[in-house]
Image (tube, helix red, strand yellow):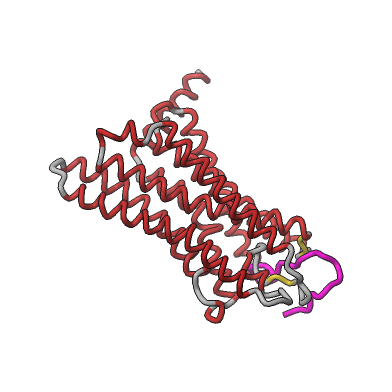
Amino acid sequence: MENYNQTSTDFILLGLFPPSRTGLVLLALTMLIFLLASIGNLSMILLILMDAHLHTPMYLLLSQLSLMDLTYISTIVPKMASTFILGNKSISFTGCGVQNFLFLTLAGAEGLLLASMAYDRYVAICFPLHYPIRMNKRVCTFMILGSWMMGSVNSCAHTVYTLHIPYCRSRAINHFFCDVPAMLRLACMDTWVYKYTVFVSTTFFLMVPFTGIACSYGRVLLAVCRMHSGEGKKKAYSTCSTHLTVVTFYYIPFAYTYLRPTSLRSPAEDKVLAVFYTILTPMLNPIIYSLRNKEVIGALRRVLHRIWSMKM
């Protein structure tokens, strides 16, 4: 590893790709994924806003997921790309703090939002007559605001502590963004107490929602098995499998990264796993929810027809 010790307060992001032709090809692929993710998530947000048929709790929650994913990938990829292309790997102390705050806010908020989406499907399938009461506009708004606020509070606490740790070793972060575990390796103080708080925080924002999701879908599967309508079963399975696919892509790499003991972790492995929840998942979510959802496809046709009619 190059020696990046310096007297300034800037950090150095070592990046994801090697400075070679292979690295350039991988960066081009990443930028294509970024473009697809941006178009997909922005289109999903606009589609839900423009089509009245999608003004339901399920799709309001989905619009927030798209907003989080859009912000998520925009927080990471542009800086990573500029670092590779311009060759300037430094990131200011403040810039690192802002990126850290946004990443942790979105990570925590998305974990809670996915649990809210699972609860929405649980109520819709298991208690359809109670759905308008249990998932009214007020409850939906509370879930959305609660996810953002709890993610922000947790992120603020971690960011403030991380930026107050004395860094007396090299300021070269062996990652492609300002990730807390990667930054802790540079600290010149014992951080075992803080690492324990990171473990507890991760457990709360990942494992607790994941347990809730597992319980919700366990009850949903039981309810689906009792259904007499073949069409109802098919629709329920389609909706649940779509959400479970998204949950799997998001939770498993995240949990494996942050809940493993430090002794079993390696920077190279952490970076590869981070690609799943920072780059791939934001691209896959709108594809998964649109291609396997007849209501979204129907809404897209209506909006396109409306736009075409206005031009005519």
Give the position of the N terminus as an image quadrant.
bottom right
Q: Residue at x 56, y 77 (%)?
A: 262
Q: Is residue 281 magenta?
A: no
Q: Residue at x 56, y 51 (%)?
A: 151
Q: Nearer the viewer, residue 226 or 194?
A: 194
Instruction: Determine whether 299 is above or below 177 in the image.
Output: above
Q: Which image quarter: residue 279?
A: bottom right
> Where does the image place residue 251, in percent across and percent down from the top left?
45, 60
Instruction: Determine whether 55 is above or below 208 in the image.
Output: above
The residue range painted magenta reads 1-19
Q: Residue at x 40, y 36 (%)?
A: 57
Q: Is residue 98 visible?
A: yes
Q: Residue furthest left?
A: 228
Q: Is residue 22 visible?
A: no
Q: Residue furthest front?
A: 193
Q: Nearer the viewer, residue 194 or 108?
A: 194
